[in-house]
């Protein structure tokens, strides 16, 4: 895509402006505050619907709606229109965007390819400002990665990554819940088997004992639907029997165990120890942090970058320093390991001791209700609620190391309330007296029924454990595969960009020898390191000068832009990007743009006269595509004019009868023109430390060299070229004769005094004509450009012009 | 004329790897691909359902 015409209405510092680069490079030149960057803002707005300058750090309260339009206008009057040339599409296409409908870029064509290209242009890949250079060069790895990822249009991948991480965390949380449910389910089984710890084989043995009593064969798998599988219904066994005094006796035995001195003291001591540990930890915030940080530090050490950069915040550390720091911190955190293990072991033991009585009470209370045994029911219910409350407070305290456990006396009352033993004895005797003793087969059946219920819960918990474990594993695999794929693809892309960057930067800074550079994706960022005089790779802002950093930013941008937009988006906008680059390297940058990016259209803004001149001298831009911005006023905004040809200025001055001004333009314009001639023909000139050669010095050198070159070219030229060379020599001789004589007229009028004041317009016109003929003799009649020398090594081999209509061999 | 976007390249690479490694069954892979095609691969709820339901019939 190339820009043919641009019309800006009421955008930023511009009221109304039309520019017509016609698909060629264009320079927008002018002092600070003349409105140059408003052109960049307008193009930014046209392609993206935003103005980047109005976004980002330090722009709080600044909006496109309020600050994107010219200060005296509203959104209705602000718009940008352009005529663009697109690859593969014959006629230029008109596009426009209005501030009042900022999200809609309207195209005057229905061709679908245009939309695709405009989507790419909308990524803002074709605009580079000084602010952008800083984003690529002098930034953290993370923000560099963000900027480059934005440019590479993979922010979507980052969104997907975040979603995958969130999903993984949610599934891990589900798995943690499943682990808790499984522990509780095992304790429920323990309540029935009256075992202290869960053992699958012991449970199977108990099942088989009861199955044997019912004439069944043993089973080998702990599955709820296996427990009664194959058992025949016996006459003396009630299937739905729920009130079994033997089972109730076992529940009561579990409760007696809880209340036993040994168990009570152990449970009390465990809770006391746990409370002390938590109280101790919660009084030392650093210890809480260390406990919480332990896993994080461990993971941080695993993720540590080779250069020692923090994987979390990208802070730069001297190599090895962060590892040392984290190792020390991990040692400190490791000292809490014992505490953490103790907490885990105590909480496990307490939970086991609490879940069994809770489970037993959950069975016993309904039984009491069923046989209308009301005495003691409230006490047992309250006991159950208190035990559950203690269990919950312990789980909460452990989760965030906040002391939530009640005092010793309350704990003791919860574990063994004073009246509960007495009530339990009453309940036991009442059950014995109220319910007849069941047969052994009935008890076996009821035990299996209860185990069936326990094992069903266990099987469900196991299933959930497995399901959540596998789901978390899948989420982890998905995330890892995404990251591996991202890194693999980016490494390929970065390698390509890195190679191109090196090749471009070497051309710009051949003084740095065989420069190397490395673009490395990290877990969360993108490292960019450049060789410093063969002393190793360093971040750009570590040792290189600002000028070098700017060159790096430019080359990195060129390489990226080329990768992303090759053959699609040929428009590159460079907004004041050479501020820190010296004149010599700017000249090389001009060569680079000519040699490497001749198919691209550059729009360059600058306030720097020398840079403008270099762009002109090196033919990056033609004189008709230099626009000078000047005289910005709040009422009229930016004013811009094409930089006028010197002859136009001279004619205008003579028309207004101002001979001195015409002479001034001839001298200054002549110096600029002859400077370019000398630049192309490379004659010997007198050395001047201030590089300010005067008109006469340049004129003599240029003429002398050009005549020599023509004389050299004649003997080796073919017949037609020889005639052409002879003709040109005659024109030069004739023009020189007149021009040399009349050079005094220029000096006389520039250095005006009364003595020379009588010089009329008619006196000066022949002088102007003579110089025009002389200057034209240095140019091609067809393309109008100054002739240039083609060298092989240091040897001058040909004289050519830009359009190649002239091609004179040299011996 | 327009290059495949990098995001597309990365996700394609991810699915190729998942397919090669047989990390997921065909149904899950198809469901994930469908999410990507409808630009909903950031939908956490849908992802949780898909990742949690694989092999449900085997369990």
Image: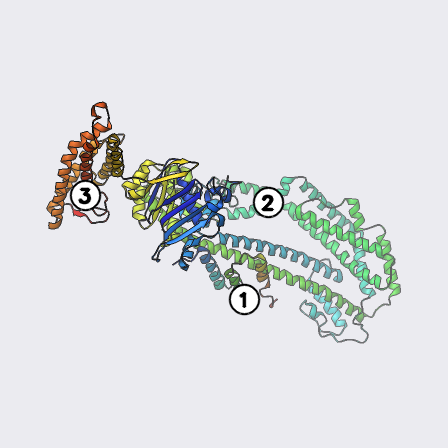
Residue on which the image places disc 2: A293
Residue on which the image places disc 1: B27
Judge left or right: residue A83 versus residue B47: left
Viewer-side residue, A473 vs A162: A162
Viewer-side residue, A99 vs A560: A99
Q: CA distance from mark 3 to mark 2?
A: 71 Å
Q: Nearer the viewer, mark 3 or mark 2?
A: 3
Check whether the beta carbons of the residues at disc 3 and disc 2 lie within 8 A of each other.
no
Check whether the beta carbons of the residues at disc 1 and disc 3 lie within 8 A of each other.
no
Residue lying farthest to the right in this orientation: A433
Query: Within 10 Å of the Cα at label 3, are there few (<14), some (14-19), or many (20+) other Cα atoms?
Result: some
Residue lying farthest to the top in this orientation: A754
Above or below, A477 against A666 in this view is below
Query: Within 10 Å of the Cα at label 1, are there few (<14), some (14-19), or many (20+) other Cα atoms?
Result: few
Measuring from the top left, give residue A628's x and y in whole percent: 34, 39
Marks 3 and 2, the one that precedes in the sequence? 2
Measuring from the top left, give residue A2's x and y in whole percent: 35, 51
What residue do we see at 39% from left, 50% from top? Answer: A82
Q: CA distance from mark 1 to mark 3?
A: 72 Å
Chain of the residue displaying label 1: B
């Amino acid at each position: 895509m190339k820009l043919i015409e641009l019309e800006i209405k009421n955008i930023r510092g511009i009221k109304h402006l039309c520019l017509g680069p016609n698909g060629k490079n264009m320079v927008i030149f002018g002092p600070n505050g003349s409105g140059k960057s408003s052109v960049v803002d307008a193009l930014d707005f046209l392609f993206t619907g935003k103005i980047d300058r109005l976004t980002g750090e330090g722009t709080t309260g600044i909006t496109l709606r309020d600050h994107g339009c010219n200060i005296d206008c509203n959104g209705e009057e602000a718009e940008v229109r352009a005529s663009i040339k697109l690859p593969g599409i014959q006629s230029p296409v008109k596009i426009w965007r209005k501030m009042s409908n900022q999200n809609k870029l309207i195209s005057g064509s229905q061709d679908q390819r245009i939309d695709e290209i405009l989507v790419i242009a909308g990524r803002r890949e074709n605009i580079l400002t000084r602010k952008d250079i800083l984003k690529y060069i002098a930034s953290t790895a993370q923000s560099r990665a963000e900027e480059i990822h934005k440019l590479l249009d993979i922010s979507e991948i980052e969104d997907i990554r975040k979603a995958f991480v969130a999903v993984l965390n949610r599934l891990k949380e589900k798995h943690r819940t499943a682990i808790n449910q499984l522990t509780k389910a095992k304790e429920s089984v323990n309540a029935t088997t009256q075992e202290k710890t869960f053992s699958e084989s012991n449970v199977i043995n108990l099942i088989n004992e009861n199955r044997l009593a019912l004439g069944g064969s043993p089973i080998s798998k702990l599955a709820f639907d296996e427990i009664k599988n194959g058992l025949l219904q016996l006459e003396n066994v009630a299937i739905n029997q729920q009130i079994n005094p033997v089972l109730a006796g076992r529940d009561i035995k579990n409760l007696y165990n809880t209340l036993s001195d040994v168990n009570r003291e152990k449970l009390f001591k465990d809770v006391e120890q746990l409370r002390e540990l938590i109280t101790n930890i919660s009084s030392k915030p650093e210890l809480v942090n260390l406990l919480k940080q332990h896993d994080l530090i461990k993971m941080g050490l695993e993720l540590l970058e080779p250069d020692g950069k923090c994987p979390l915040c990208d802070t730069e550390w001297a190599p090895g320093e962060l590892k040392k720091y984290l190792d020390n911190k991990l040692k400190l955190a490791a000292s809490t390991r014992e505490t953490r293990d103790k907490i885990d072991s105590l909480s496990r033991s307490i939970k086991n001791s609490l879940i069994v009585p809770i489970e037993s009470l959950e069975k016993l209370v309904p039984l009491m209700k069923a046989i209308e045994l009301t005495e003691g029911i409230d006490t047992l219910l309250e006991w159950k609620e208190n035990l559950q409350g203690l269990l919950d407070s312990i789980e909460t305290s452990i989760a965030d190391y906040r002391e939530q456990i009640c005092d010793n006396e309350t704990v003791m009352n919860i574990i063994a309330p004073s009246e509960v033993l007495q009530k339990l004895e009453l309940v036991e005797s009442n059950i014995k007296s109220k319910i007849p003793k069941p047969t052994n087969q009935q008890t076996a059946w009821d035990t299996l029924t209860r185990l069936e219920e326990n094992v069903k819960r266990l099987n469900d918990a196991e299933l959930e454990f497995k399901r959540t474990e596998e789901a978390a594993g899948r989420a982890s695999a998905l995330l890892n595969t995404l990251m591996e794929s991202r890194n693999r693809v980016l490494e390929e892309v970065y390698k390509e960009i890195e190679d191109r960057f090196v090749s471009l930067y070497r051309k710009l800074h051949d003084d740095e020898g065989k420069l190397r550079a490395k673009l490395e994706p990290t877990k969360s960022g993108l490292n960019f390191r450049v060789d410093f005089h063969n002393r190793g790779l360093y971040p750009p802002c570590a040792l290189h000068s600002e000028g070098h950093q700017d060159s790096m930013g430019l080359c990195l941008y060129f390489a990226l832009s080329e990768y992303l937009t090759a053959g699609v988006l040929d428009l590159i906008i460079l907004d004041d990007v050479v501020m820190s680059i010296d004149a010599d390297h700017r000249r090389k940058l001009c060569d680079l743009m000519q040699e490497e990016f001749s198919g691209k259209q550059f729009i360059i803004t600058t306030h720097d006269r020398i840079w403008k001149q270099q762009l002109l001298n090196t033919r990056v831009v033609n004189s008709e595509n230099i626009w000078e911005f000047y005289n910005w006023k709040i009422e009229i905004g930016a004013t811009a004019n094409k930089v006028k040809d010197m002859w136009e200025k001279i004619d205008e001055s003579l028309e207004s009868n101002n001979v001195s001004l015409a002479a001034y333009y001839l001298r200054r314009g002549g110096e600029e023109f002859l400077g370019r001639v000398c630049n192309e023909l490379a004659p010997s000139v007198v050395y001047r430390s201030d590089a300010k050669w005067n008109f006469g010095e340049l004129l003599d050198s240029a003429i002398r060299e050009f005549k020599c070159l023509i004389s050299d070219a004649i003997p080796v030229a073919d017949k037609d070229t020889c005639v052409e060379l002879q003709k040109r020599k005659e024109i030069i001789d004739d023009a020189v004769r007149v021009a040399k004589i009349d050079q005094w007229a220029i000096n006389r009028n520039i250095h005006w005094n009364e003595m020379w004041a009588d010089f009329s317009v008619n006196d000066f016109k022949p002088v102007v004509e003579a110089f025009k003929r002389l200057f034209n003799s240095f140019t091609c009649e067809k393309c109008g450009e100054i002739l240039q020398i083609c060298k092989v090594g240091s040897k001058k081999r040909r004289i050519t012009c830009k359009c190649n209509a002239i091609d004179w061999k040299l011996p | 004329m327009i290059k495949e976007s990098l995001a597309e390249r990365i996700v394609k690479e991810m699915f190729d790897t998942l397919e090669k490694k047989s990390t997921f069954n065909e149904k899950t892979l198809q469901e994930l691909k469908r999410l990507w095609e409808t630009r909903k691969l950031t939908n956490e709820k849908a992802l949780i359902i898909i990742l949690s339901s694989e092999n449900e019939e085997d369990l």
